[in-house]
Image: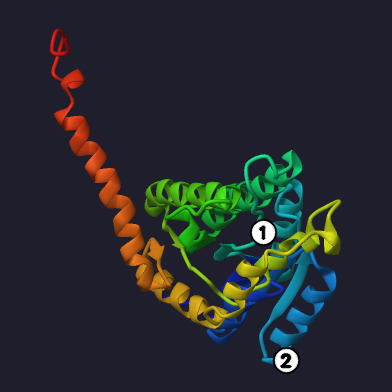
Amino acid sequence: MKDFEGKVAFVTGGASGIGLALGEAFGRLGMKVMLADVEAGALDKAVARLKAQGVAAAGVICDVSRRDAVQAAADATLAAFGKIHIVCNNAGVSVTGRIGELRPRDWDWILDINLKGVIHGTEVFTPLIERHGEGGHFVNTASMGGMISAPTHEPYTATKFAVIGMSEGWAGQLSARGIGVTVLCPAFVRTRIAESRRNQPGAGAGEPVNAAAKAAVEAGMAPEVVAGMAIEAIRATELYVFTHPEFETVVRERFDRILAAFERARLSPFLSGPGSVT
């Protein structure tokens, strides 16, 4: 996509953080913006903030873990603005813990939002973008945690690795239909993700906050930077957005280990044919 003026963006997790920054950035480009979130009060404030900037904006309550809720949000967007061009599958939560500490409902919650939420957004909105024939773009928020894994962050990295893998496949499918795909892979950004258990059913404010993660997030990048880089990627139809190039060394180390494993496989006597191992 090159032309944003008058087109429509839909952003999940739109009441704060990267989602709100994306909404504001799209609004500055002359787009109409539908913000979706589960927190009604924060959503109302975010919509009012965009409107105060002269943006044609609206909000819709949407639990992305439910396909019917995503479909209802899509219907509300069409009712408000007529079409949808850019979809940002941005809503996400974080769960950390050691083996044996995590509860089944923790796994269910993060998989339902971070993984299934992206699936629902892509599958619901793809035919709606195709219908108008004007092209479009998906922006899927993954993480640097989708490239490297840290101990105790396995639930989060499981979902973010999946978002990157799905986005790579969808990019191949959708390019022929005039729809681009970008996957955001930021590291620490000033959002409320460290406090995301506040919205976990049955949990809420009583759940502990990972103090180290919260401190790292609070010292992180401004979400407006991520939004600006996302728009650059949409214009150029770039698949990956890495907002923290300093993590390149860590990613290279991971890929070096993978390539070394391929070399070991190439030299393995077990792959040399029958009778090669005695």
Neighbor class of circle 1 (other Cα within 10 Å; few <14, some 14-19, many 20+) is many
> Residue at left 51%, top 51%?
163
Work out whether 98 lies above or below 226: above
In the structure shown, which secondary structural element does the residue marked by tag 2 occupy?
A: helix
107 vs 238, left or right, is: right
User: Between marks 1 and 2, how big is the CA–CA gap?
Assistant: 28 Å
Residue behind mark 1 = 93
Neighbor class of circle 2 (other Cα within 10 Å; few <14, some 14-19, many 20+) is few
Ranked by sequence position, the earlier of labels 1 and 2 is 2
Residue behind mark 2 = 52
> Residue at left 46%, top 75%?
231
In the structure shown, which secondary structural element does the residue marked by tag 1 occupy?
A: loop
Question: Residue 113 placed where, x, y %?
Answer: 67, 52
240 vs 12, left or right, is: left
Residue type of the residue flagged with mark 1 = Val
Residue type of the residue flagged with mark 2 = Ala
Foreground: 89 or 2? 89
- Which callout, 1 or 2, points to the residue nearer the camera? 1
Model colouring: rainbow
Residue 50 appears anywhere in the view: yes
